[in-house]
Every structure is written in C-alpha cells, then in structure tokens.
C-alpha cells in the first residue's frame, strides 16, 4: 500500500508541468507537446484528399496520440487528491473533472470515441477536434509568455469590458439606424432591426464583406460615419492591451515584478524575531525560496544583501516552483478536533525555530499574525529553520 501511494505521488509530480527541476517531468512535458503537435498535424492532413493513400497511417497516429491523451487524463483524475489536498479523494477528482483544464482534457479525447457510440453526429464530433489545440494551454500557461498575456488581460479587464460594451451599444444603434433608412428600399436585406447586426459587425470591424450594403443616400452617409467609428472602436481595445504590455514590461525592468512564474508568501518580522536586525545576506531561507521584496511603512524596498530587517517589516518570499516551496516548509491541514483550532497563532506550541509563514483559508491566503485566530479546515504553512 505504501509503495502504491509513493508511486501515485511520483506520477503526480511527473504530470505537473511547472516542475522543471524534475527531469522525468520535463521529459513528459516535451512528450505531451510533441504528441499534441502531431495530433493537430494529423487532423489537418486528414482533410486533404491527395493524402488519402496515407489514411491508415494517419489513423494509426491519431489512435496512438488519443491513447496517450486518455492515459494522461485518467492519471490526472487518479492523482487529483494531491492537486487539491484540502478536499477528499472523490471530491478532488470531481473538482478536477469540472475544472477548465479537466474539461479541455475530456474534450480532447471525446471526439475520437463519440462517433463509435453516436454515428449520426460524426460531423459535429469532428468539429470538436479543434478543442485539442487548447490542450497546449496547459503547457504554455506555466511559462512567461502566456503569463504576461493573462496578467495584462486581468489587469486591464475593466477597461476592456468598457470598450466591448461601447462597441456593442454602437453596433446595436447602427443596426437600428440602418434598418430605419434601408428597410423600405431593401426589405429582403433589412426585414427587421436585428437583421442589420451582420452588416454593422462587418462594418464596425472594418471587414466589409459587401454582401449587404446601403443604397440610399442617408444609408450611405450613415455607413461612412459608422465605418469611421469602427476604426476607433477597434483601436481602443488594441491600445489598452498595448499599453498594458508596455506597463508590465516597464515594471519588470524597474524590478517591481520579480518573476512572472513565482508564487509568493509573506513573513512578518515582529519584535524579537530572529531575523530582526540582520541583513538579508545573513538570514537562512529554505531551498527554493528567495527574498522577493521587503515592505516597510508602505514602501517597497529592493531585497539587496545589505538591507537590514527591522521589526514591523514584511518580508515577501518567492518560489520559482510551487512544488519546491515544500522544502523546509510543512503544510498542516487542521481537521475537526485538532488542538490548534480556536487558538491564536501566537499561542501555538511550536518550536522557537519554527514560524507560521502563511495561513490558507479556503481560496484566500491570510497574512499570519500573533493574534490571528485559527479555524477548522485552515491550512498552515510552517517554516522550520
């Protein structure tokens, strides 16, 4: 049983994409990327009638790649309890299945198996094969390029939503105006207000297919105005995203962002803390952790080796790998009946060389203080010096 549990955890570690320090895990990541690319290329080539002579070879390659995806999906379900340690075994598996990447993994393999069950929907199932491209997001999401994109979109989401809302309003208004001007002349193209949506979208986005166009003088004048507005509407979200990239890389250059792929925890330096009064170069941190910044009186200080820590400082620790942060750090989940429940962190009976560096409560990370009360199901990260 212990061997099975050990093997299960080892498989989970190999499956984790961000664990670049593990050679087997890195090799598995490379293998999955190659399999995804091969599957997409085969799917693309199957659409060419000129390659019909190689149909059996391509079908065999597709079968091999789908089997690899299937095994990976089943292994991820099997080891989901390590991905969501706060949940029970079956709840963790259910959470993974219903998660974004779990659904992507499922949709990656379903288009291959569903035609064997529902032969009448084969065409629709073939369309679902496009979802396999999303499988690449699992790999790419762990690297800087994709993280920059997602970070910028999150930071600018309010401005982007405002611009999209404005585009929708202008699109509906243009459709209504064009219906009023063109309905009597072109009832077949503008039978109702909603019929102008296609025309307004193609015009606002500067595509202009020309399958529907105004013929009245008023309609053409309105089309010119809307076309000019369309250029501005497209430029607004483009400018927002471009400005976001410039701001983000400026922060990286100035040192405001330490690493794009780092996880962070914070450690409060209280009076009498062994780190108080010591320069950063003399403190000992667990393997995989580094000093990312020091917060002092709402000021962010660069973590150079000569900087001396003072009582009241907040030391921000970063880890370049989510799994490596476990070196020197113990994670304790407080189940019902645990003696620490209902106590304050400052009253815990732990070694003087041990410190609570983070408290996780549900989906929130709470800065631990001596007067912080501990509740059932809390997860404590304790650093043992």
Image (cartoon, rainbow, N blue to C red):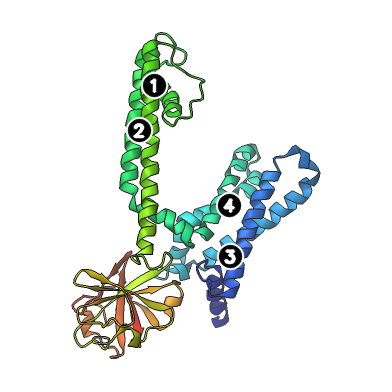
Mark 4–mark 2 Cα distance, whole angstroms, equals 33 Å
x and y percentages locating residue 95 in the rendered image: 44, 60
Question: CA separation, marks 3 and 2?
Answer: 41 Å
Crowding near the residue tagged with mark 3, few <14, some 14–19, many ≥20 C-alpha atoms within 10 Å: many
**Whole-percent x and y of residue 359?**
30, 73
Asked if residue 49 lies left or right of residue 331, the reply is right
Instruction: Decide which of 29, 73 is in the foreground and name it.
Output: 29
Q: In which quarter of the image is residue 300?
A: bottom left
The residue at which mark 4 appears reads as 108
Distance of mark 1 from mark 4, alpha carbons? 45 Å
The quadrant of the rendering that contains the C terminus is: bottom left
- The residue at which mark 3 appears reads as 29
Quarter assignment of residue 344: bottom left
Would residue 123 be found to the left or right of residue 356 on screen? right
Residue of label 1: 224
**Mark linked to residue 168:** 2
Picture layout, residue 380 above or below residue 118: below
Going from N to C along the chain, the mark reached first, 1 or 4, is 4
Q: Residue furthest right?
A: 53
Q: Do the residues labelled 3 and 2 touch (CB within 8 Å)?
A: no
Q: Pinpoint residue 267: horizontal percent, then vertical percent.
A: 28, 77
Q: Position of residue 15 (x, y in %)?
A: 55, 68
Q: Which element type, helix, strand or loop, lies under badge 2?
A: helix
- CB-based contact (under 8 Å), mark 1 and mark 3: no
- At 71% from the left and 43% from the top, the residue drawn is 46
Q: Nearer the N terminus, badge 3 or badge 4?
A: 3
Say what secondary structure mark 1 lies in: helix
The residue at the far bottom in this view is 352
- Is label 1 or label 4 in front? 1
Please tell me which of labels 2 and 1 falls first in the chain.
2
């Amino acid at each position: 049983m212990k061997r099975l549990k050990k093997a299960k955890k080892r498989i989970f570690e190999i499956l984790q994409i961000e664990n670049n320090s593990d050679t087997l895990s890195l090799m598995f990541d490379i293998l999955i990327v190659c399999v995804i690319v091969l599957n997409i290329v085969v799917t693309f080539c199957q659409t060419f009638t000129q390659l019909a002579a190689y149909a059996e070879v391509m079908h065999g390659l597709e079968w091999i790649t789908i089997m690899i995806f299937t095994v990976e999906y089943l292994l991820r379900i099997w080891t989901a309890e390590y991905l969501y340690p706060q949940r029970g075994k079956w709840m963790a598996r259910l959470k993974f299945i219903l998660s974004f990447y779990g659904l992507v993994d499922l949709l990656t393999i379903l288009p291959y198996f569903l035609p064997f069950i529902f032969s009448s929907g084969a065409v629709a199932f073939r369309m679902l094969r496009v979802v396999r491209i999303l499988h690449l997001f699992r790999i790419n999401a762990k690297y800087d390029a994709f993280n920059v994109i997602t970070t910028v979109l999150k930071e600018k989401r309010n401005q982007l939503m405002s611009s999209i809302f404005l585009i929708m309003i202008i699109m509906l208004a243009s459709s209504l105006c064009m219906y009023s001007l063109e309905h009597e002349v072109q009832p077949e193209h503008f039978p109702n207000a909603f019929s102008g949506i296609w025309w307004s979208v193609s015009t606002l986005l500067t595509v202009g297919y020309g399958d529907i166009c105004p013929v009245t003088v008023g309609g053409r004048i309105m089309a010119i105005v809307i076309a000019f507005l369309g250029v501005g509407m497209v430029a607004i979200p483009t400018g927002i995203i471009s400005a976001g990239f410039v701001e983000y890389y400026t922060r990286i250059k100035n040192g405001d962002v330490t690493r794009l792929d780092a996880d962070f925890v914070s450690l409060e330096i209280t009076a009498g803390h062994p780190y108080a009064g010591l320069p950063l170069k003399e403190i000992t941190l667990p393997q995989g952790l580094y000093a990312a910044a020091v917060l002092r009186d709402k000021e962010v200080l660069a973590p150079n080796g000569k900087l001396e820590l003072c009582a009241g400082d907040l030391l921000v620790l970063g880890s370049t790998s989510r799994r490596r942060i476990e070196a020197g750090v113990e994670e304790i989940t407080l189940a019902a009946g645990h003696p620490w429940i209902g106590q304050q962190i400052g009253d815990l009976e732990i070694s003087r060389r041990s410190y609570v560096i983070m408290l996780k409560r549900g989906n929130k990370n709470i800065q631990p203080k001596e007067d912080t009360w501990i509740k059932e199901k809390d997860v404590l990260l304790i650093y043992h010096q």
